[in-house]
Image (cartoon, helix red, strand yellow):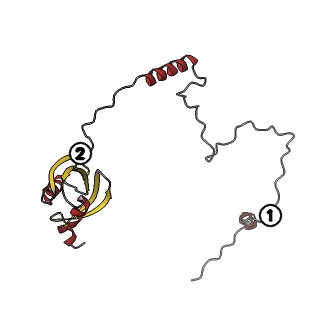
Amino acid sequence: MGKDKKQKPESDIVDLAGRIGARGATPPEPDLATEKPSREPPKDRHDAPIALPPKPRLVAEKPDRDQGALIRKALAEENEKVEPAIPSPRSAPGPGEVDLVATPLPTPDDWHRFELALRKVSGVGQLRTEYYRHGVLKVRVSYQGQDRLASVLRAGVPGYRVRVIGEDRATLQILVSAEAEERRPS
């Protein structure tokens, strides 16, 4: 059997040229003189700055003259008073003493082991811990020996490898690593 051919009436014909953008009949232009201009505000733009109320000010716009006089008076009184310095529990190292700052000693156990190893170094006498914070140990070391403490520590703290990173008359800064850590494969 064959297909039935249906005929479309001419009224169903669609103008495709108008749909795809071809120019057809032009619409009439509006008469601007007879039309009323629209008073509607333009649509809000998404990229426009956001209108915010003004921020409150903490400082007055005009300085207060009375307050300025009070401030000047307080500053003058402050300069006249000489107060003693705040006493500090820490003092500068005495003769034969050096502040030793060692890092990294991540745990208190590492700190304790390092102090025990430091006591075995020849020439090192009394150790007094100043502080231990965040893996940094500061110890006041009394040392009596022919060489500088830095060279003695480089030569050997039992079980540790020591690198001197800073030195002055009263302070010695060192990097510490345990010899057992160096032997571990990375």
Residue 15: x and y, percent?
Answer: 74, 65
Mark 2 element type: loop
How many numbered circles are shown?
2
Residue 62 quadrant: top right
Q: Residue at x 23, y 45 (%)?
A: 94
Q: SS at mark 1?
A: loop
Q: Amino acid at mark 1?
A: Arg
- At a point 72% along the width and 64% down the height, the residue shown is 19
The residue that disc 1 covers is 23
Mark 2 against mark 1, which lies toward the viewer? 2
> Which of the 4 quarters of the picture holds residue 37?
top right
Residue 93 locus on image (x, y percent): 25, 46
Q: Which mark is residue 9?
A: none
Left or right for 164, reference 7: left
Quadrant for residue 45, please give it. top right
| Numbered label attached to residue 94 | 2
82 or 104: nearer the viewer = 82
Amino acid marked by disc 2: Gly
- Closer to the N terminus: mark 2 or mark 1? 1
